Amino acid sequence: MVMGSIAENLKEINEKLPDEVTLVAVSKTKPGALLMEAYKEGQRIFGENKVQELVEKYEHLPKDIQWHFIGHLQTNKVKYLAPFVSLIHGVDSVKLLKAINKEGKKCHRRIPCLLQIHIAKESTKFGLSFEEVEAVVEQKVLEGLENVSVVGLMGMATNTSDLEVVRNEFHSLKSLFDQLNAGYFKDCDNFSVLSMGMSGDFSIAIEEGSSMVRVGSSIFGARNYSNKKQIV
Ligand SMILES: *Cc1c(COP(=O)(O)O)cnc(C)c1O
């Protein structure tokens, strides 16, 4: 595939997104100059999956950028993100919720989080099972966590060319989202985010009810992990 410029890629993706769907530009491994190309086109939400890389970019790039953490977060690193992070997508344990709460308290913030749900077939993908989410809710874990705001769910589909598998996984996540929205989070106005869909599957995710897509390679091109380069 011949990639267009970042501006062209962004325009093409934005044309495919309904107004109510939020685009997170996944900029992991990409240098600050490329993020700025997207910024100049109006993009303000960027997603990163490494704490140190996110913090370095936060320090060097414009302050009106909203930073989303989309990776697997270790409890001992929450403190670096707590003062400024806009949304943590991958919360997959009570231990992590408690750590975020603790650091949120220190910063006098209520940190917005998404519970990551395991919907894929691969065992390598992180996330809570449906049963574990139910347990978190039933045991009223969230009630004691005043500095955490669970605003929705996040999931990653199986990496497969079988689009029916992908669709079914997104469908099951949307069902869980609707169920929680009508049940436990009924009186919670800000339980509204369903983060699902990446470069290869965001159109299906939107058809299945996604409200937030995380798109990297379709905007910035393929990632090259082996090539250690300066980040900012
Ligand atoms: C890298 C990543 C993405 C973006 O993937 P692309 O296929 O490049 O769009 C989305 N979500 C998560 C959690 C990621 O780690």
Image (tube, rainbow, N blue to C red):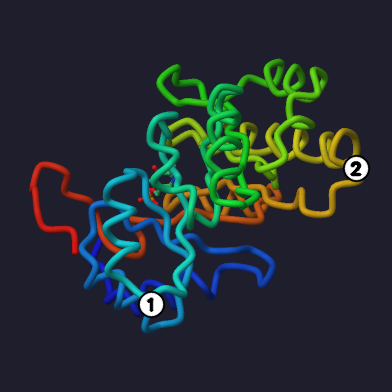
Identified by mark 1, the residue type is: Tyr
Is ligand 1 within 8 Å of the beta carbon of the residue shown at mark 1?
no
User: Which corner quadrant holds the N terminus?
Assistant: bottom left
Identified by mark 2, the residue type is: Lys
In front here: 166 or 54? Answer: 54
Residue at the (44%, 78%) spot, across then down: 11
Residue at the (37%, 75%) spot, across then down: 62
Question: Which of the 4 image quarters holds residue 203?
Answer: bottom right
Residue 28: x, y in percent?
Answer: 30, 52
In front here: 230 or 63? Answer: 63
Q: Is residue 74 above or below residue 14?
A: above
Q: Which residue is mark 1?
A: 39
Residue at the (70%, 34%) spot, across then down: 145
The label on residue 186 is 2
The disc, 2 or 1, on the residue closer to the chain's N-terminal end is 1
Residue 7: x, y in percent?
Answer: 35, 79
